[in-house]
Image (cartoon, rainbow, N blue to C red):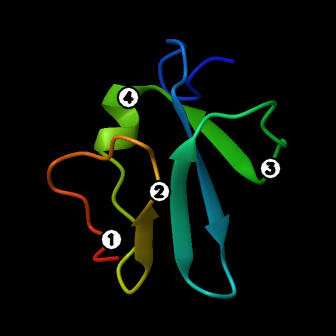
Amino acid sequence: MNCVRCSSISTSCLTYAYDLREAWLVDRGGAADPGTRYPLCTKHADRVTPPQGWILHDRRSQPTLFAQDPA
């Protein structure tokens, strides 16, 4: 599966829960569901910023040094 931003090989997926105002970055595992999971390469996953007022949970096995998720 390729990154939706640049067509590089994806390493993770971005998922949103609009009603909760939360987003998750997770390791790529299996096929992404169209409309609910967005495959991203490492470069673009590292640059994800959620909308103002949202929480980003970085659940990748090797999150970036400046991950926003405190847990």
Question: What residue do we see at 44% from left, 67% from top?
Answer: 57
Q: CA distance from mark 3 to mark 2?
A: 20 Å
- Residue 39: image quadrant is top right
- Residue 38: image quadrant is top right
Label 2 Cα neighbours within 10 Å, binned few <14 / some 14-19 / many ≥20 = some
Q: Mark 4 against mark 3, which lies toward the viewer?
A: 4
- Tell me if residue 30 comes above or below residue 64 in the rendering: above
Of mark 3 and mark 2, the one earlier in the sequence is 3
Q: CA distance from mark 2 to mark 4?
A: 13 Å
In percent of width and height, residue 19 lies at 69, 87
Q: Do labels 1 and 2 touch, CB within 8 Å?
A: yes
Q: Which residue is mark 3?
A: 35
Question: What residue do we see at 78% from left, 37% from top?
Answer: 32
In percent of width and height, residue 62 lies at 34, 40
Q: CA distance from mark 3 to mark 1?
A: 23 Å
Q: CA distance from mark 1 to mark 2?
A: 8 Å
Q: Which mark is residue 42?
A: 4
Q: Which mark is residue 59?
A: 2
